[in-house]
Structures are given as C-alpha cells and as structure tokens.
Image: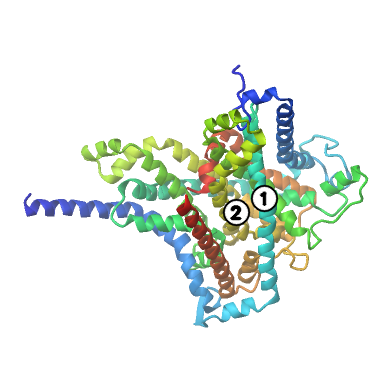
Amino acid sequence: MKKAQHTGVIRGYDLHAASVRVFYAVIVILCCLMVVLALFPLVWVSLAGFKDLREFLSSTSIIPSAFSMDAYATTWNQLGITRNYLNSLISVAGSVVCALVFNGLLGYGLGILKPKGHGVVKRMVLLSLLMPPTISIVPLFMNIQKLHMGNSFLPLWLSFGANAMYVILFMQFFESLPASIIEAGRIDGCSQLQTFFRIVLPLSRPICAVVSIFAVNAAWSDFLLPYLVLRGADKQTVMVRLFVFSTEQTVNADAMMRSVVFAMVPPIILFFLFQKQLTENAVSVGIKG
Amino acid sequence: MSSSGTQLRSHAKLRENVQSWLIMLPGLILMLFFVWGPLFESVRMSLYKTRNVELVRFIGLDNFISVTGKDDFLQALVNTFSYTFWSLLIGFALPIVLAILIGETTRGKSFFRTAVYLPNMLPGLAVIILWSAFFSGEKSGVLNILLARLGIPPQTYLTRADWVIPIIIIIATWKGAGATALIYMAGMASISPELYEAAAIDGASVWRRIIHILLPAIRKLAGTLLILQIISVFQIMYEPMVLTMGGPDNASLSLMQLMWQYAFGGSMNYGKASAVAVIVTLILLAMTAVYSYFNRKESDWD
C-alpha cells in the first residue's frame, strides 16, 4: 500500500513536533465526529421505521425491538406507494431526456456554433442563474394553466429542458473539445446537426452522465411545481405524496418516517452508484459555472 | 475575389447562422417559457388586479402598497433577514472548517468527503420531515430522548419564537455544508505546496500557514459562495411551511412563503403574490450589485 502523504497545510516533517501530532489527532477525531453527525439521522430514521406507533412514541432506544419488514410493508401497501414510485419514474425519465436534449443543443449552439448574436443569449443564461427559480413559480403556473397542460407530466419534463446550469455545464464542456475534430467533420460535409450527433455527442459521454445524474436527483426531489401541476391522485409522485402528507398531517408519526425512508432510498442508491462523479462534479454544479 | 464569390460566401455564412439559431431554438423557447418569460410576467402581473389567471385591470403600485402595508409583510421581511443572519453565522464558516479538516487528513480522505456530501443528495422535503422528529417537543422527540439520558427534562423547540429560525438554518446547514466544503477543498487544492514548504522553512507554524496562506487564497471563492448562500436563503419557503406553517405566530414566516400563501393559500391572489416576488427579486438584485461593485473595486487594487 502506498504510504499516506501529508499534502495539506501540515507537511510530513511537521509531525516530528508533538504538538502537531496532537493537532493531527484532533483533526481526525473531528472528521469522524462529522461523519457521525452526517449519517446518524439517516441511521436513526431507517431504524425507527421498524417500530410500530406505540413503540415509536414510547421507546427511548434507537434500536427497534424487532427487525421485521412488516411495518414497512404495511405502510407501503396502505399508502399505495407503488403507484407513486411509477409516477416518479415516469417523471424522472422524461425529465432526464429533456435535460440532455434541449440543454445539450443550446449548449452546442453557445459553445461551438456561436452564431452572430449568441453573446446576448449567453449573458441571459448566466444572469438567470442568479434568480432563484421559485420566484417565478406563480406566473409559470399560470402559463401552464393557460396552455391547459395541467395534470400532465409534460410541463415537468419540459421544465428540465430549461435549466441554465445544465446549459452552462454543456457549453463549457463543448468549448473544451479540440476545434480540429469539429473542423474535420465540417470539411467532410457534415451539417451542423450531423456534426453534433456524429462527432460531438460520442465525445460527450462524461458530461451527459454528470447532467443525467444531477437531473435524476433533481427530478426525484422536486415537489413544488409537481404539486401544483399534478393535482390528480393518480399522477402524484413520491415527493408530492410526501408533501401532501406533511401539510395535511393525516399520517401517523411512524408511517411518516417510513415514507421519508421510501423517499430517500432511490437518491441514496444513486449516490452509492455514482459517488465518484457526484463528489468530483459537486464543484461545478455548486458554483454553477 | 469576385463580388459573386463574396456574395456566395456571405450567403453560406447567413445560412450557417440561421441553421445554428434553429438548433438552439427549442432550448431558447423553453428558457423563454420557463425562466425568462415568467420573470417579466411577474413584474407585469404585480401591476395588475388579477382574478384567477386573468389580468383584470392595471392598478399601478396598489398591490405593492396593499402587500407592504400588512403586518405579516414586515414580519416576513424581518424574518428573511434573520434567516440570512443565522445562515451566515452558522453556515458560512462551517464549510471552510470542514474543508480544512478533511484536507489535512491522509487516510480516509475520500471516505470523509463522500460521507459529508451524502446529506446534500437527499430530497429537501424528506430532510425537513426527518428532522422534525428530532426537534419534536414530545417526549418521543429524538433530542428529548437524548436529553433524558442526561437527566434533562424534555424541551420544546419549534414552538419557541426565538429558536425556530436558527433550527431551520441548522437543518439547512446539515444538508448543504458538506457540498460547499467540497467546493472549498477544490479551491484549496490549487494552492501551490511550495508556498507551505517555504513558509515552513521560514519557521511559520501550521496555524500561521492557515491564516496567512490558506485563507487569503480562498477569499475570492468565499465571496462568491457568500452571495450564492444569501440567494439560496431568500428561497427558504417550504422548510417553515412544512415544519411550523410559519409559526409560532408568524415567527418563521419567510417572504417566499408569504408569496406562496397569496397565490396558493386559498385566495389565489396572483397579483399580490407577484408583488412579493418582485420585492424579493429587487432585494436580490441590489445585493448582487453591491457585491459585484466591491468585487470590481478589489480586483482594481490587485
């Protein structure tokens, strides 16, 4: 195994001093504490889900008295979550497709084609990053109503095709592609659209993966617009269902915690499958370009 | 070159431009419908009396006068700044500390990075409901169970007017701090190790290296993240909606929540809701302008 290197502020030779060794030990202890703080609520909620209501309200132990999946299964069936999972799946799948196609093409235009006047669009895209999306949810909802797209997944899918952050991620990636490859395609007589599908897209697997992962997570977690749009119970996604529970408070505390677990499992699976892409790209997504 | 040649070329150039715009068109239409249009629309709507989705008549600034004249507006405005204050107090320095701590570890660095990032992936709504069980004032609340172990009687949390905003900020920080820490770590990784080596040779302690090399190097990044953090705090809406319904006695009501109440809280007053949205937009624009003014001044000196 490679010997661990001190590559931060503390350099290897600093550890000769006892005070620095103590300091380093404190750092490691604090890091472990941080991990406990980050994970404890998740461990607690999944364990609490095994308890029935009486035990949930009276027990002071975080370990449930029995590990049977009955409580989870009962809540799942009682609330009919299968339907909501299917709806979420439909919503997520369409959203990811729209996120890739529309933002990808716009990013291609701004990053490679750069037609006359594209600078204005670029500036407008960058500016819209500064405005929180919830600010315009009222007129957006009204526009959707006017077009009679209520109670349909279509506006939710399409809303992912208008994401300034994804446009910028695509644009920056395309700008980093070597110009010679794209030029070669042009000389071979490809049209701009052919160049995109034959040359640019095959090179863009990494950025497509990143945008897809973040779009899956965002589409899964989104509930404000879906709540306003999907009024019928037959189209509610998992998060919309959870939101309805939380505002109406018709669900028992223990079943509520199990619903929270149901809502968290897919993102956690996604996280463990793609933790490398996620943590490596947290920077660009966090700063948003 | 003959004039017909240039004409042919400019013709080809024009066709290429048109094609490029056509490729971008679907994305542009969606941006217009979902992002840019609604922003302008909310300004227009805020100046109209509305009935359902119809604009009834132009009433100038009446919506603004009516909205700002109510007690709950002043309360929500003060609360929103209180959210910002607590968020900066609790949530601004913490990611920097996390990043320094994780950056100094040798073994397990990627494990620590992954673990602190995980909460950021969880749906915000699920996180709020999960934490409501921790801050429940009942004996079965998780914090009260922990306090009981220490022999402390159960406390109430979310029903205390002076605790509710800090608690909501703690929950938001739990979710977001790890992700922000990763951004700082990337910034810190670009500091040249030679700077530390040279400082060490000059006898600078680890602490002094942090103060004089590491912190100045991330100052600009910290400025950017500060403004992004303020923007995201102004979005706080569903957190108090779900956790406390804005209570106790409007103590956690935020501006965006007030907007939601006007629009979807039963009265469907979209005009007044838009007036609140426009006010928030103006506050954010003003803050961004102040930030970029100072930012420019600073880079002039550099």
Q: Which of A68 and A110 is in front in this view?
A: A110
Above or below, A8 relative to B51: above
Q: Identify which amino acid the numbered label 2 is placed on.
A: Gln
Q: Quadrant of the N terminus of chain A?
A: top right
User: Is residue B8 found left or right of B18 in the rendered image?
Assistant: left
**Do the residues bearing badges 1 and 2 touch, measured as CB atoms within 8 Å?**
yes
Secondary element at image label 2? helix
Mark 1, secondary structure of its residue: helix
- Closer to the chain start, of discs 1 and 2, is 1
Residue B49 occupies which quadrant of the picture?
bottom right
Q: In which quarter of the image is residue A271?
A: top right
| Residue behind mark 2 | B229
Taking the image as drawn, is residue A6 in sight?
Answer: yes
Residue at the spot x=78%, y=50% of the render?
B133
Looking at this view, name the residue that lies furthest to the front. B202
Seen in the image, is B267 located left or right of residue A149?
right
